[in-house]
Image (cartoon, helix red, strand yellow):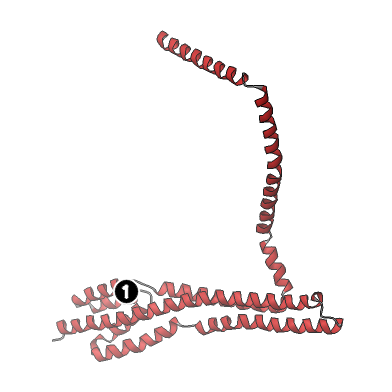
């Protein structure tokens, strides 16, 4: 323990001596150098003050813009003639509602069709037709429904099964495309309402010119502003709905392809079942 204390004391003395040496060297610097440093420090502070002020102003302006974005949209909505802007907003709400409904429906319709067909084939290889029907009945989606319709007529021949599958497949394809015509209607309606607001704004601008008897920018600005704002909002709504519509179409095409492939595979499975159990 004594050796430890002695070592600590020696380290303390060495540290104290080094600090004293450094302080002595710092205090021994020329006075002119200190004056120069003070002057340069004062200049840097003076130069930094406007930079800091500008940075603070930029931060405040950005915060104000972030907080007031919804207020800006609300103001522009009111400035763009609340009547026509409300119609555009209603078109967007109904269009988005239909898009969300279709996306949810199509997402729930997607299944692992390969596993479904493997389960059906395993059941039919054992001659369990009722088990294959139960598998189809307990699985959601159009592919399972088509397979169930085919299994219901498995004893009536392969031609009857094929006709049943094709007919019911067209019905399921129509169900997948349900309400898509309404979405296209709202896609076309949104910019049309915006253009209608544009025409109304131009008419208002000419009315103001006629009343004032002058074509000054201040007279024309009000009607032109309404015209441009309604057009912008109408085009934005149409673009948003168009993106959702194309996404829905891609899912519909994928499901149609899945139904066609599954129908062909189901016919092959039923043909193998007939060859094995109906010789």
How would you rate the neighbour count of disc 1 (Cα within 10 Å): few for under 14, some for 14-19, many for 20 or more? Answer: some
Asked where in the image residue 266 lies, by quadrant, the reply is bottom left
Position of residue 20 measured from the top left corner of the image (x, y, whole percent): 56, 16
Q: Determine the residue positioned at 70% across, 71% down.
A: 77
In the image, residue 60 above or below residue 267: above
Using the image, determine if residue 41 lies above or below residue 101: above
Where disc 1 sits, the SS reads helix
Image coordinates of residue 252 in percent, x first then y, are 42, 79
Q: Is residue 218 visible?
A: yes
Q: Nearer the viewer, residue 11 or 268?
A: 11
Position in image of residue 124 (x %, y %) = 21, 77
Residue of label 1: 113
Q: Residue at x 30, y 82 (%)?
A: 263
- Please give the name of the residue rendered at 63% of the width and 83% of the height, measured from the top-left corner: 192
Q: Quadrant of residue 272?
A: bottom left
Residue at horizontal 32%, vertical 82%?
260
Side (left or right) of 126 relative to 173: left
Q: Position of residue 16 (x, y in %)?
A: 53, 15
Residue 165 left/right relative to 203? left
Q: Is residue 100 above or below residue 35?
A: below
Q: Residue furthest left?
A: 279
Say left or right for 186 vs 165: right
Callout count:
1
- Residue 93 visible in rendering: no
* Nearer the observer, 73 or 99: 73
In the picture, which quadrant includes the C terminus? bottom left
Task: For the N terminus, give its image quadrant.
Answer: top left
Q: Nearer the viewer, residue 257 or 152?
A: 257
């Amino acid at each position: 323990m004594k050796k430890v204390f002695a070592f600590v004391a020696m380290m303390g003395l060495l540290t104290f001596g080094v600090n004293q040496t450094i302080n002595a060297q710092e205090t021994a610097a020329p006075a002119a150098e200190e004056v120069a440093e003070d002057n340069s420090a004062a200049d840097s502070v003076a130069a930094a003050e406007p930079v800091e002020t500008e940075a603070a102003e930029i931060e405040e302006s950005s915060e104000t813009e972030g907080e007031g974005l919804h207020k800006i949209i609300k103001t522009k909505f009111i400035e763009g003639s609340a009547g026509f802007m409300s119609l555009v907003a209603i078109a967007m709400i109904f269009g988005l509602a239909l898009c969300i409904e279709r996306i949810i429906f199509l997402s729930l319709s997607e299944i692992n069709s390969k596993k479904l067909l493997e389960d059906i084939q395993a059941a039919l290889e054992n001659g369990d037709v009722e088990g294959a029907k139960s598998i189809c009945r307990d699985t959601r989606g159009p592919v399972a429904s088509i397979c169930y319709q085919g299994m219901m007529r498995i004893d009536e021949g392969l031609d009857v099964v094929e006709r049943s599958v094709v007919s019911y497949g067209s019905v399921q394809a129509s169900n997948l495309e349900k309400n898509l015509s309404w979405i296209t209607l709202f896609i076309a309606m949104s910019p049309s309402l915006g253009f209608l607001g544009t025409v109304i704004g131009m008419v208002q601008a000419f009315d103001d010119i006629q009343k004032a008897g002058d074509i000054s920018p201040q007279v024309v600005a009000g009607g032109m502003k309404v015209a441009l704002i309604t057009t912008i909002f109408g085009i934005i709504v149409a673009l948003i709905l168009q993106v959702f519509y194309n996404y829905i179409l891609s899912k519909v095409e994928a499901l149609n392809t899945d139904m066609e492939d599954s129908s062909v595979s189901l016919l092959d499975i039923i043909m193998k079942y007939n060859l094995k159990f109906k010789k």
